[in-house]
Image: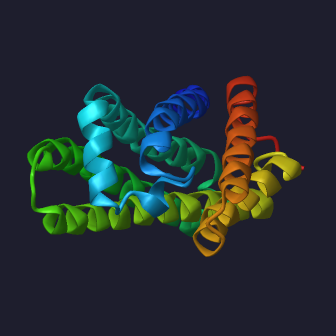
Amino acid sequence: MKLQKLGGWTAIGLVCVSITSAALLSRIGPRIGPADFAAISIDPVKMAAAYAALPGVFNALLPFSILRGICALLIALALRERMQAGAPVLMRLSVIAASACAAMLSIVAIAAMLGHASFAGSVDMSAYRAFLVMLNGINATAINAFGWELLIIGWAALSTRALPRILSCFIFAAGVAHFIQFAFIHPSVMAARGVLAGISMIWLAVVLLRNPEPVTA
């Protein structure tokens, strides 16, 4: 029960961390191009100039990346406690996906902290471009892993009815949206993903904090 309450507070924390990260990214975005940060961050010249102008913003983003991964893992563990009796395999898979997400977000944060500073002022933009492509690939894989986590949790919740059905559908849809964004890279798709995930996490927090034990129907 305590773990599920922790999961509820963690879901709120994930929303706060995501909003703060989006606010920081909005300061970098105008310096590097379109709103889709991931798609254009392979431009090494723009990225180097942005880092030179806003090193504090870049460094502030890094702990939030690690926190997002920790939140994802804690949420999966809390929901495994709630649903493992009815869907043990699915919840085990959700924890695996969350663990992969947490590990890769930590790698992105640590590599970015060292890499951006190392390439600052460098004239070898080809090496910096390769570094950015690698960083983007790991970050995209982490987002994909989080999408799998949400999709599996939504699937398990629908099958066990351990969460309200509409909430389960929102979580499942948020997971699907994390995949769709790679096929349709557009600000509206990114926004839809964020809205679905945000609503799901806030609603999930309310359920876990008010009803730490599942109510089956």
Counting labels gives 0
Seen in the picture, residue 198 relative to 12 is either above or below; the reply is below
Residue 85 locus on image (x, y percent): 63, 56
Foreground: 22 or 126?
126
- Residue 56 sits above or below residue 82 on the image: above
**Residue nearest the viewer, comparing 120 with 18:** 120
Q: Along the horizontal axis of the image, is 7 left or right of 154?
A: left
Tell me which residue sits at (42%, 66%) in the image: 141
Which residue does the image show at 54% across and 42% down from the upper left? 75
- Residue at 48% across, 34% down: 21
| Residue 204 drawn at (x, y percent) | 71, 37
Which residue corresponds to the image point at 59% horizontal and 56% vertical from the top-left?
A: 84
Q: Is residue 37 left or right of residue 102?
A: right
The answer to whether residue 138 is visible is yes
User: Residue 156 appears at what percent x and percent y?
Assistant: 69, 62
Task: Give the left or right position of residue 85, taking residue 65 as reference.
Answer: right
Quadrant in which the N terminus is drawn: top right
- Outermost residue on the bottom side: it is 183
Please provide percent x and percent y for residue 41: 39, 57
Does residue 161 appear anywhere in the picture?
no
Residue 4 lies, with reference to residue 186, above or below; the image says above
- Where residue 152 sits, quadrant-wise, is bottom right
- Identify which residue, 188 or 148, lies in the foreground: 188
Scheme of colours in the image: rainbow
